[in-house]
Image (cartoon, rainbow, N blue to C red):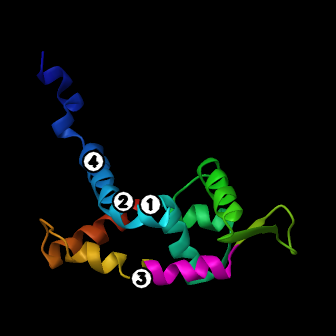
């Protein structure tokens, strides 16, 4: 009977360790982001905007693998806090462009050491394994 449902055993699922690791990694960011009033999702939005300054909502969703239903309330909140602006594109008013404000850029200074602090923490992976995992995960995302 158990062999008939082997495909349903949790230990046989690729999705579960990916899901659990994702939650564990996000939890590792929380002590650094919470004092800044940020969630992990807001943090990755800032990372894109710090790099690009302005981006359409569609591009942002594509880069972060997030849908509009997730992004819209998050962006509204960040706009209300004065971190970003949202306006219609002059070329195509169906497109909403998100831009970082001075206040949003100022947050970069407070966040600059977060990746270093996390990298310095305990990891079960060697540097080589971490790079291999990084490449495999992006291969999966792009596939």
The kind of secondary structure element at disc 4 is helix
Q: Is residue 42 magenta?
A: no
Q: Earlier in the sequence, mark 1 or mark 3?
A: 1
Q: Are marks 2 and 3 in contact (CB under 8 Å)?
A: no
Badge 2 density bin: few <14, some 14–19, many ≥20, Cα 10 Å: some
State the CA–CA distance, disc 1 to disc 2: 7 Å
> Can the viewer see residue 131?
no
Q: Residue at position x 29%, y 66% from top?
A: 136
Q: Are marks 1 and 2 in contact (CB under 8 Å)?
A: yes
Which residue carries the number 2 mark?
30
Along the viewing direction, whichever of 18 and 105 lies nearer the viewer: 105
Q: How many badges with numbers are in the image?
A: 4
Residue 112 is labelled as 3
| Highlighted range, magenta | 99-110
Between label 3 and label 4, give the one nearer the viewer: 3
Q: Earlier in the sequence, mark 1 or mark 2?
A: 2
């Amino acid at each position: 009977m158990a062999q008939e449902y082997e495909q349903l055993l949790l230990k046989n699922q690729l999705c579960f360790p990916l899901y659990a690791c994702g939650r564990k990694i996000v939890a590792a960011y929380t002590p650094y982001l919470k004092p800044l009033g940020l969630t992990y999702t807001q943090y990755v939005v800032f990372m894109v905007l710090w790099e690009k300054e302005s981006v359409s909502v569609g591009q942002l969703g594509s880069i972060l693998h997030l849908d509009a239903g997730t992004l819209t309330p998050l962006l509204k909140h960040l706009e209300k806090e004065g971190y970003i602006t949202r306006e219609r594109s002059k070329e195509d008013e169906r497109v909403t462009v998100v831009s970082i404000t001075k206040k949003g850029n100022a947050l970069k200074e407070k966040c600059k050491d977060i990746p270093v602090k996390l990298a310095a923490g305990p990891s079960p992976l060697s540097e080589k394994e971490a790079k291999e995992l990084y490449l495999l995960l992006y291969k999966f995302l792009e596939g």
